[in-house]
Image: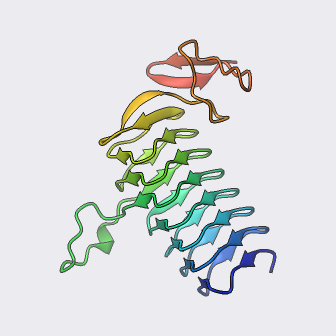
Amino acid sequence: MDYFVHESSYVDDDVIIGQETKIWHFSHIISGSRIGANCNIGQNVVIGPDVSIGNQCKIQNNVSVYKGVTLEDDVFCGPSMVFTNVFNPRAHIRRMDEARPTLVKKGSTLGANCTVVCGHTIGKYAFVGAGAVITKDVPDYALVAGNPARQVGWMCQCGEKLPENLYCASCSIQYIEDDCRLKKYV
């Protein structure tokens, strides 16, 4: 094995796990799922079935990544954050064929205890604040907070909140805002 799985965790058959990935205590990786290289899967995490997780993702303790969720590379899922996959669940009505896909793009951060309602896209390098509830798509580089989540600023790809001039003093990247979207200035 080119990856680590703690002895208390379960990895079903028909799972792909990339090199140097670490799966910690009491986690379960369900059949059909794919986890990229250099990921860190925390304690008490459930992944799958049929979930795709990119390279260098960090999924903190107590997160369930349900069918229909795709995480691109470099995504951070904070402790106890929540994904849903059925918009209107009922215990007595089977609706798994109604699962709505959720896409979390490259470099995004999902803060502790936030909730992502299914069927939405979190843009690249977006930052979802702790406890926020996502009820619509989040643009690339957006900083969102609250319930329901609203945009409260912009974030640099390095993880620093951008000032009004959209210049990141930490990594020297200049951004421009164009049609309510943020882009790197070239």
Q: Is residue 107 above or below residue 89?
A: above
Q: Is residue 29 above or below residue 78?
A: below
In the picture shown, does residue 19 fall above or below 57? below
17 over 115 or under it: above or below: below
39 with respect to 31 (left or right): right
Kindly identify the residue that appears in the image at 67 percent across and 35 percent down: 158
Measuring 20% from the left and 72% from the top, which residue is drawn there? 90
**Numbered marks: total:** 0
Q: Give the image location of residue 84, x and y in percent.
A: 36, 62
Please identify the quadrant where the N terminus is shown. bottom right
Q: Which of these two is toward me, 12 or 179?
A: 12
Q: Quadrant of the C terminus?
A: top right
Left or right position of 87 against 155: left
Occupied quadrant, residue 166: top right
Q: Position of residue 102 (x, y in %)?
A: 43, 55
Q: Residue at x 78, y 69 (%)?
A: 19
Residue found at the far right of this picture: 2
- Depth check: give the residue in front, 96 or 151: 151
Task: Give how far across and how far down residue 174 sits, in percent.
Answer: 66, 18
Across and down, in percent, residue 46 comes to 51, 74
Picture quadrant of residue 34:
bottom right
